Amino acid sequence: EVQSIDSKQYINEKDVINRQNFVLGTDNFGRDVLTELISATGSSLKIGLVAGIIATVIGLFLGLLAGYLGGFVDNLILFFTNLFTVIPSFVLLILISYSVGESQRGIMMVALLIGITAWPWTTRSVRSQVISLRNRDHVNLSKLSGHSMLRIVLTYVASYVVMAFILQISSGILAEAQLSMIGLGPATTKTATLGLMMQWATQYNAHLNGAWWAYFPVILVIALISFSLNLMNTGLDQVFNPQL
């Protein structure tokens, strides 16, 4: 039997079953923001990881090829690298994302697009490292010891590539957030990302309505992830860099 309760009657909250407290409140659709934030963080890290792997692999391959072979190959790779460097990567990313179409822009597709537009600076950095290794005394000593130049290059560049990979992950997460803010991020209603949460908060005027829980925790998580990855990069530099 259903009983009606007058709006002026008081109840004891401890007697209410299935009661749930929302630490960060809910969004416009009644979804728990904290649960959504945790899920979105995992999705954004996945995007950053995939984009970082793609960008680092492309940059490492082209950088090693240019620095190790030199000559015409070096000039050709450097030409295309400079071409992509002159065009802002984010503008290129916007054009490609728009041309792909909303229905095709899943999480993995966005990660792929970010990865294939973020390789130029890794290529230039790896190329510079390889060229500088040719004239170092300890490299000449290693060559006299019977080690091949390719093995020497891979050994010394490996630590630098790990640090570049960490920075690529951070850049990938920030790129996804920027894309989503302008409506060109992953087109999904099932899986949230940090950028999509920012877009939803902006779309429903959370910043004007005083609903800080809809956007401030997202900004804080993005900042903490970027800070943590850069801190990790600095720590690895102190481990790998012999001059420090």
Image (cartoon, rainbow, N blue to C red):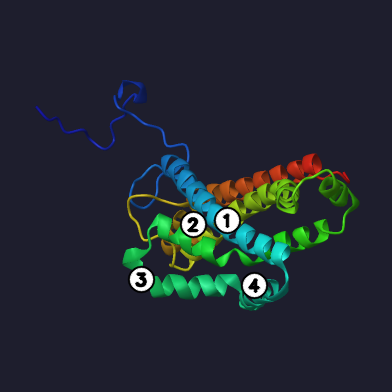
Q: Earlier in the sequence, mark 3 or mark 1?
A: 1
Nearest to viewer (mark 1 / mark 4): 4
Residue occupying the far top of the picture: 15
Mark 3, other Cα within 10 Å: few <14 / some 14–19 / many ≥20: few
Estimate the x, y position of residue 214 in percent, counting from the top left.
47, 51
Q: Which residue: 77% across, 46% down? A: 147
Q: Earlier in the sequence, mark 3 or mark 2?
A: 3
Say above or below: 10 vs 160.
above
Nearest to viewer (mark 2 / mark 1): 1
Q: CA distance from mark 3 to mark 4?
A: 30 Å
Q: Which residue is mark 4?
A: 77
Q: Secondary structure at mark 4?
A: helix
In this rendered view, identify the residue nearer to me: 84 or 146: 146
Mark 4, other Cα within 10 Å: few <14 / some 14–19 / many ≥20: many
Q: Which residue is mark 2?
A: 195
Q: CA distance from mark 2 to mark 1?
A: 25 Å
Q: Is residue 209 visible?
A: no
In this rendered view, identify the residue nearer to me: 101 or 153: 153
Cβ–Cβ under 8 Å for marks 3 and 1: no
Q: Going by the image, does 210 lie left or right of 2? A: right
Residue occupying the far left of the picture: 1
Q: Which residue is mark 3?
A: 101
Q: Which residue is mark 1?
A: 57
Q: Secondary structure at mark 2?
A: helix
